[in-house]
Image (cartoon, rainbow, N blue to C red):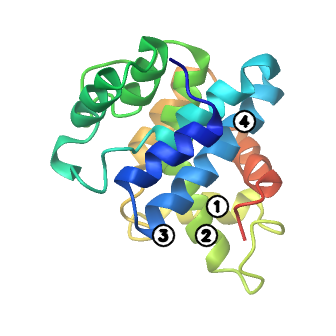
Amino acid sequence: MIPTPEQAWALLTQYNQGDFHQKHARVVGDVMRWYAQELGYGEQADFWEAVGILHDLDFEQFPQEHCKKEQQILRELGIDEALVHAVVSHGYGLTIDVAPEHEMEKVLFATDELTGLIGAAAIMRPSKSVQDLELKSVKKKFKDKRFAAGCSREVIAQGAQLLGWDLDTLITRTIDAMRASPNVE
């Protein structure tokens, strides 16, 4: 079974009650949908969005088993293996040894941490909005390891490399994706 974005959301909220994790799931889902359309996978936009929504399904309840517990949960529910591989691969090198293979998996790997960094940078602006956030501001925050310290710069850079993009391209595109999200203030 491949869940729709609505079914993915219902499943996510069974395992994640916190506002932070729910908002993150919505934002990453929106970013993934945007990238699907931008990169020529528009017919798979629902799938990409569902992957984005579900990528941290297990994190709130099982942080020490992140990605490992998730694959178990999804398989027990009969979720399609393509979705299982996609969500699990975002933990590559951190919690699990499942590498991102498809372009969609590489986008998730690259943007998961980056959405957090961009969101934190936006909050620091007088407008508190991503709408007027510029690349140079995010790059400045990217260089400051103390800022949004939980967002791994190494993972973001590795994600850009996996995609064959430079860091500026990844950041610029992800800012654009977040601007298009109805779930980003």
Query: In this view of the protein, which residue sits in the foreground, 162 or 30?
Result: 30
User: Disc 4 vs disc 3: which is toward the camera?
Assistant: 3
Q: Upstream in the sequence, badge 2 or badge 4?
A: 4
Badge 2 or badge 1: first in the primary sequence: 2
- Decide if residue 37 is on the left or right side of residue 178: right
Q: Pinpoint residue 129: horizontal percent, then vertical percent.
A: 75, 73
- Which residue is found at the position 47% from the left and 39% from the top? 54
Q: Kindly report which numbered mark, 4 or 1, lies closer to the viewer in this rendering.
A: 4
- Number of numbered labels in the structure image: 4
Judging by the rendered image, the residue that carries numbered circle 3 is 19
The residue that mark 4 highlights is 33
Q: Position of residue 156 (x, y in %)?
A: 49, 41
- Residue beneath disc 2: 121
> Could you say which disc has been placed on residue 138 in the image?
1
Amino acid type of the residue tagged 3 in the rendering: Asp
Instruction: For marks 4 and 1, give the CA distance.
Output: 22 Å
Q: What element carries label 4?
A: helix
Disc 2 versus disc 4: distance between alpha carbons? 22 Å
The residue located at (40%, 18%) in the rendering is: 85
- Mark 3 and mark 1 in contact? Answer it, CB < 8 Å: no
